[in-house]
Image: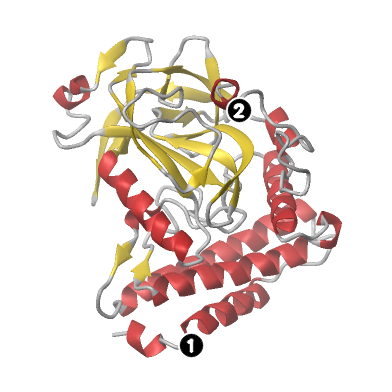
């Protein structure tokens, strides 16, 4: 795994790199056992920016190359963990670390490593880079663009300081070259010549810190879904300082609904809307199973009152997220602890949402 190169061998359950067993580890060992991987190679790269507020155990220095500057490659080599319907994002590894705001992270994601495809049998492979144009979308599949990565980073810094749970950018790495499906290396300019990149687009690897990488509406079979939820529930329990056996599924679901309400309420109170909590094409939702807001490159800020339609869009998205959470929990628990009811959880969400907005509701609507 690439994790061995960037910070040593993968962490196992109960083995926290000497940081202390009270920190959250989740079910890392189980996730490691069932992971899907694809080979990657380090390509020519340059670290553009490193977050000074995150204490991540990574080899990153601005102006230099990093072993995290990797691209999918058909040749045997280091592997990176990939996930069904995460088309350009992969997981470099899991290790416990913190930021200077007191937030704890474990999963290190890298966005923009190439185009990842899963077939009907859910087997991953490297696909050709291409330009995608449909309706309002116009993007290079498999790549992350510098301006989007910078916007996601900047919004994350605002959200973290406001107490909004989200992922956080660790570093941004510019690619100097890439690898095609036939294992040939090419200069990035060739993508511009082929029309895959626009002239003003710079492809980068966005290195991001998550608690858990898995999201609501994640792909995969029932076994993987079960492990992902078990992992998230244990991570949250440990983060809250609760014994996992005392933080059952219903307590987890209520915590999730309440936290989502707080997150979206605080976003709106600051004048922000996400606008893409439910991505197109049945992709996993942009909320992780430990309730962090992710993929913030679509977030907009309004200096004046937020248009009603934008407020409603994020709130309707929350409806769908909570409903999907209920359906997935009912599936993996087989309702042995009782049914997870959407309307009761949505009331928990709405109460937390209203509490956040109580003092400034009139300023948010037009």
**Which quadrant of the rendered structure holds the N terminus?**
top right
Answer left or right for 355 relative to 327. left
Q: Quadrant of residue 73?
A: top left
The image shows residue 85, relative to residue 291, as above or below, that is above
Scheme of colours in the image: secondary structure
Answer left or right for 64 relative to 340. left
The number of numbered badges drawn on the structure is 2
The image shows residue 277, relative to residue 35, as above or below, that is below
Identify the residue at horizontal 50%, vertical 56% (top origin). 166
Q: Give neighbour class at mark 2: few <14, some 14-19, many 20+ (Cα, 10 Å).
A: some
Find residue 123 and name its label. Answer: none
- Residue 283 position, x and y percent, is 47, 47
Mark 2 residue element: strand
Kindly report the distance in space between the C-alpha atoms of the residues bearing marks 1 and 2: 45 Å
Identify the residue at horizontal 57%, vertical 44% (top origin). 213
- Which residue is nearer to you in this view: 169 or 90? 169
**Which quadrant of the rendered structure holds the C terminus?**
bottom left
Q: Do we see residue 140 in this rendering?
A: yes
Mark 1 residue element: loop
Disc nearest the viewer among 1 and 2 = 1
- Disc 1 vs disc 2: Cβ atoms closer than 8 Å? no
Find residue 36 and name its label. Answer: 2
Answer left or right for 275 relative to 54. left
- Which residue is nearer to you in this view: 189 or 21? 21
Find residue 358 and name its label. Answer: 1
- Residue 256 position, x and y percent, is 63, 64
- Residue 111 position, x and y percent, is 42, 37
- Residue 174 position, x and y percent, is 31, 30
């Amino acid at each position: 795994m690439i994790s061995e190169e960037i910070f040593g061998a993968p962490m196992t359950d109960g083995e926290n790199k000497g940081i202390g067993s009270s920190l959250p580890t989740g079910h890392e060992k189980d996730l490691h056992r069932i992971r899907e991987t694809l080979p990657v190679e380090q390509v020519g790269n340059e670290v553009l920016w490193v977050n000074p507020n995150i204490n991540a155990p990574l080899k990153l220095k601005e102006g230099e190359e990093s072993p995290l500057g990797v691209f999918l490659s058909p040749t045997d080599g280091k592997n990176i963990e990939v996930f069904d319907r995460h088309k350009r994002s992969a997981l470099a590894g899991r290790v416990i670390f913190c930021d200077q705001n007191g937030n704890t992270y474990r999963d290190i994601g890298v966005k923009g490593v190439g185009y990842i495809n899963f077939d009907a049998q859910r087997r991953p492979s490297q696909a050709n880079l291409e330009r995608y144009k449909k309706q309002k979308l116009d993007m290079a599949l498999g790549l992350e663009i510098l301006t989007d990565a910078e916007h996601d980073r900047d919004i994350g810094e605002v959200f973290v300081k406001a107490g909004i749970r989200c992922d956080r950018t660790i570093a941004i790495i510019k690619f100097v070259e890439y690898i095609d499906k036939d294992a040939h290396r090419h200069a990035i300019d060739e993508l511009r010549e082929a029309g895959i990149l626009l002239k003003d687009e710079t492809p980068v690897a966005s290195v991001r810190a998550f608690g858990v990488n898995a999201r609501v509406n994640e792909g995969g079979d029932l076994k993987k879904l079960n492990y992902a939820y078990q992992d998230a529930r244990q991570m949250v329990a440990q983060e809250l300082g609760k014994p996992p056996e005392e933080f059952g599924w219903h307590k987890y679901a209520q915590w999730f609904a309440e936290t989502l309400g707080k997150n979206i309420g605080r976003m709106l109170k600051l004048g922000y809307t996400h606008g893409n909590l439910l991505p197109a094409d049945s992709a996993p939702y942009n909320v992780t199973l430990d309730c962090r807001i992710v993929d913030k490159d679509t977030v907009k800020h309004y200096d004046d009152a937020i248009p009603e339609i934008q407020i409603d869009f994020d709130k309707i998205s929350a409806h769908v997220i909570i409903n999907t959470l209920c359906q997935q929990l009912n599936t993996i628990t087989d309702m042995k602890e009782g049914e997870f009811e959407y309307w009761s959880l949505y009331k928990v969400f709405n109460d937390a949402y209203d509490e956040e907005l109580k003092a400034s509701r009139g300023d948010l609507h037009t």
